Amino acid sequence: MENIQYSPEFLPMQSNNYERLKEPRAVTLVSRSSTVGNAAAPAASPRDHIVWSLFNTMYMNYFCLGFIALYFSVKARDRKVIGDLEGACEYGATARCLNLTSLILFFITLVIVIILVSVGVFQVIHFQQNPLSRGSGGD
């Protein structure tokens, strides 16, 4: 094996002219009697309701409201990524209204179907118990 010697010209230059990263920190002072905090609350991110819109698109797509809500949800997410929080709030609010409308229409349809099925079941039971009361026209 060869003995390899390192010369100083191949070693990286050590320079201390780098700048440290400055991170915002919340200052919290703790004492025995009380805790004092000086941290600012982070700005609330606007909601885009994309999962709710996907669910409505797949399962409760009345009058294409789920597709339209999904469109507005994607627009809200895009605006949030860009940094336009006001536009994201507007698109998110529109998506929420469309999702609520779709949900309300679903529940109304569900109630109507339950009522119709229960009335139909009661009619079948009634006709099975009273076979002569079908109103056959007096033969």
Image (cartoon, rainbow, N blue to C red):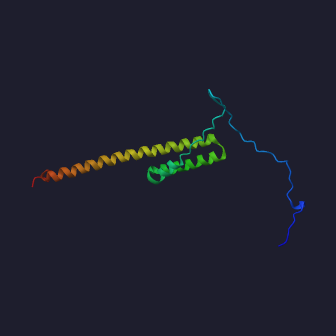
Residue 43 percent coordinates (x, y): 63, 38
Which of 75 and 41 lies nearest the eye of the viewer?
Answer: 41
Kindly identify the residue that appears in the image at 60 percent across and 43 percent down.
Answer: 88
User: Is residue 134 in view from this perspective?
Assistant: no
Q: Residue furthest bottom?
A: 1
Residue 68 percent coordinates (x, y): 52, 49
Q: Is residue 123 above or below residue 34?
A: below
Q: With 27 as the anchor, is 110 left or right in this view?
A: left
Kindly identify the residue that appears in the image at 42 percent across and 43 percent down.
Answer: 104
Residue 15 percent coordinates (x, y): 86, 51
Q: Residue furthest left?
A: 139
Kindly identify the residue that appears in the image at 86 percent across and 53 percent down.
Answer: 14
* Numbered label tally: 0
Kindly identify the residue that appears in the image at 10 percent across and 52 percent down.
Answer: 138
Residue 28 percent coordinates (x, y): 66, 33
Which of 99 and 45 lies nearest the eye of the viewer?
Answer: 45
Q: With 122 as the anchor, is 137 left or right in this view?
A: left
Q: With 111 as the anchor, is 52 left or right in this view?
A: right
Q: Is residue 10 above or below residue 40?
A: below
Q: Residue furthest top?
A: 33
Q: Is residue 92 above or below residue 134?
A: above
The quarter of the image holding the C terminus is: bottom left
Q: With 44 as the anchor, is 67 left or right in this view?
A: left
